Amino acid sequence: MLGGIVTVAAAGLAYAHLETKLFTVRHVTVPALPTGERDLRVLHVSDLHLTPTQHRKIAWVRSLAALEPDLVIDTGDNLAHREALGPLLHALEPLLEQAPGAFVMGSNDYYAPKPKNPARYLWTRSGPRTRSAPNLPAAELAAAMSGAGWVDLTNRRDAVVVDGRRIAFAGVDDPHLGLDDFPAPGPAHADEGEALLRLGVTHAPYTRVLDQMYADGADAIIAGHTHGGQLCVPFYGALVTNCDIDRRRAKGLHGWPGARPDAPDGEDSTWLHVSAGAGTSPYAPVRFACRPEATLITFTAR
């Protein structure tokens, strides 16, 4: 009996490690554009947690350019190693050259991961990190992305023009570190109401931030951080979210604050997309029933 349990546990652990390499692209459709507008294809990339030796992940990220998105949104936690900036920029290079983009930072763009008790993934959420000087090259990463033309949404508003259509953004720095300071609109953003689409962008989907973006009139909110729960139970879903959002919305397309899509009680809600991300901490390289992912979000007419 005991031997059988050990065998099953070992097989499950081996599969959970394998699943971290089973990269996939999810496709979702969000009816948020004005009537008659042609589709807008947005690639959402999040939580790569890249280390220099993850060559399969690097090749997969590079391959995402074949999707030919109109816009790329990166919701942070790109790095997991002090020497990962070069490999990360190599991975993102085709996307940086191909499409306009926008980004925010996550905690693992600022701070290198540390060994932790694996059981922490079964806790409701991790505690706040002791504030210290960042030891990852977040500033250099932001400069490289900005230099390629992607807009930095670190507690600020901005916009991009995609094929003649204006997309307005309001973003925040990582709420998991308490760095979020939601940007109030100013005179420079008086024309936001004329934008084709208004997007809120955050790394971690804490409810205080989602409420601010909803109140601000976002047509959709884009977030990451949760890893989709990372260790999930088939037919049940995520056990934890590592923030205060509910387990049901640990990944995928939902509504905020209502139920959407697209139940009557969600008609007054905005859309919320949470990515399960494409990586893990190098100290917990396992996923179960939660494949690493990027998402191609097709915004279509209502």
Image: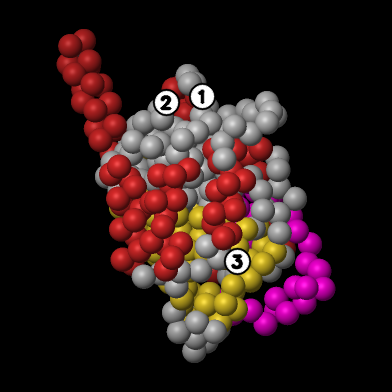
Visible residue check, residue 250: no
Q: Position of residue 46 (x, y in %)?
A: 47, 50
Magenta residue check for 169: no
Residue at numbered disc 2: 283
Seen at 34% across and 47% down, the residue is 58
The residues tagged by marks 1 and 3 sit, at their Cα atoms, a distance apart of: 33 Å
Q: Amino acid at mark 1?
A: Lys
Q: Earlier in the sequence, mark 1 or mark 3?
A: 1
Residue 119 shown left or right of residue 203 in the figure? left
Mark 3 vs mark 2, CA separation in Å:
33 Å
Q: Nearer the viewer, residue 200 or 302?
A: 200
Label number found at residue 199: 3
Q: Residue at x 67, y 67 (%)?
A: 158
Looking at the rendered structure, the kind of residue marked 2 is Tyr
| Residue 29, percent from left and from top | 42, 69
Question: Where is residue 301 drawn, in percent x and y?
Answer: 48, 81
Q: CA distance from mark 2 to mark 1?
A: 7 Å
Residue bearing the label numbered 1? 114
Residue 221 is left or right of residue 274, and the answer is: right
Circles 2 and 1: CB atoms closer than 8 Å = yes
Q: Give the mark toward the camera: 3 or 2.
A: 2
Please report the bounds of the magenta region as a residue range.
182-210
Kind of element beneath mark 3? strand
> Crowding near pointer 2: few (<14 within 10 Å), some, many (20+)?
few
